Image: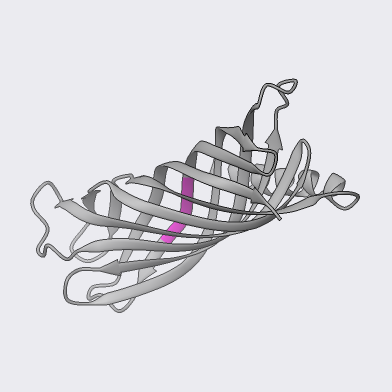
Amino acid sequence: MKKFIAACAALLVFCASAPLAQAATPYASFSGGVAFLSDSDEKGGAGDNALEFDAGYIVNGALGLDADMYRVEGAVGYQHNGVAKYDGGPPSSDDEKISILSFMANGYVDIPMNGAGVEPYVMAGIGVASVGADNGVVEDSDTVLAYQFGAGVAFDASPNIAVDLGYRYFMASDATFEDINPVLDYTISSHNILAGVRVGL
């Protein structure tokens, strides 16, 4: 399933890039919001354990090209979530956390609404993520394949500025932390709700 979603994301980015080669308007965007990191299966050591996370935060910045119905962009994002529970009990340290630094290529299809000033969209992206784990004593990170898809709506604030509200489902390959003893693997997926602004350049 994950491989299928990644292939769809790559296809959407490719399809969206064709019209952009002819005529496009550059833009910059910034967004932030709430990140709900799904429970993670910790594999390794004495056995498999479950981690539950507090709601965290996410920020994103992007530069892209807009050609009416299609957009492509390169985006950098950072997400932070603290560990709420470890295998049903409290974490060993209040400092336990997961952080995700992502570098994504995203493609969008904007759905025109006949000049209503409101524009729904769907999107998908693929890239890499540096996933960091901190158990309060040792920090480690792993770079893995990442992909996402989502939907949202943009509202025209002016001819050159749009306000954006959106949802992203972000996934990554299992992250392996070799500096933590014993070596551990974490599963990574997150439901993210973002608000932002997009400015034509």
Q: Quadrant of the N terminus?
A: top right
Front-most of residues 26 and 191:
26
Eyeballing the image, is 165 above or below 176? above
195 up-or-down from 180: above or below:
above
Q: What stretch is highlighted in magenta?
A: 170-174
Q: Is residue 124 found inside the magenta-colored segment of the image? A: no
Q: In which quarter of the image is the C terminus?
A: bottom right
The residue located at (22%, 77%) in the rendering is 138
Judged left or right of residue 95, residue 55 is: right
Taking the view exactly as shown, the residue that stands out farthest to the right is 22
Q: In this rendering, does residue 133 appear at all? A: yes
Measuring from the top left, give residue 153's x and y in whole percent. Answer: 57, 31
Is 146 on the left-hand or right-hand side of 89? right
Q: In this view, does 180 lie above or below 92?
A: below
Total numbered circles? 0
- Does residue 159 appear to the left or right of 18 in the view shown? left
Question: Main structural element of the magenta stretch: helix, strand or loop?
Answer: strand
Q: Where is residue 183 shown, x and y percent of the image?
A: 29, 72
Name the residue at 33% across, 44% down.
38
Nearest the eye: 114 or 38: 114
Q: Which of 74 and 157 is in front in this view?
A: 157
Q: Is residue 3 visible?
A: no
x and y, in percent, of residue 13 in the image:
72, 48
Q: Residue furthest front?
A: 158
Name the image quarter holding residue 186.
bottom left
Question: Is 8 left, or right, of 16 in this rendering?
Answer: left
Residue 99, x across and y down, in percent: 35, 63
Instruction: Please name whichever residue, 102 or 23, is drawn nearer the observer in this view of the structure.
Output: 23
Applied colour scheme: one colour
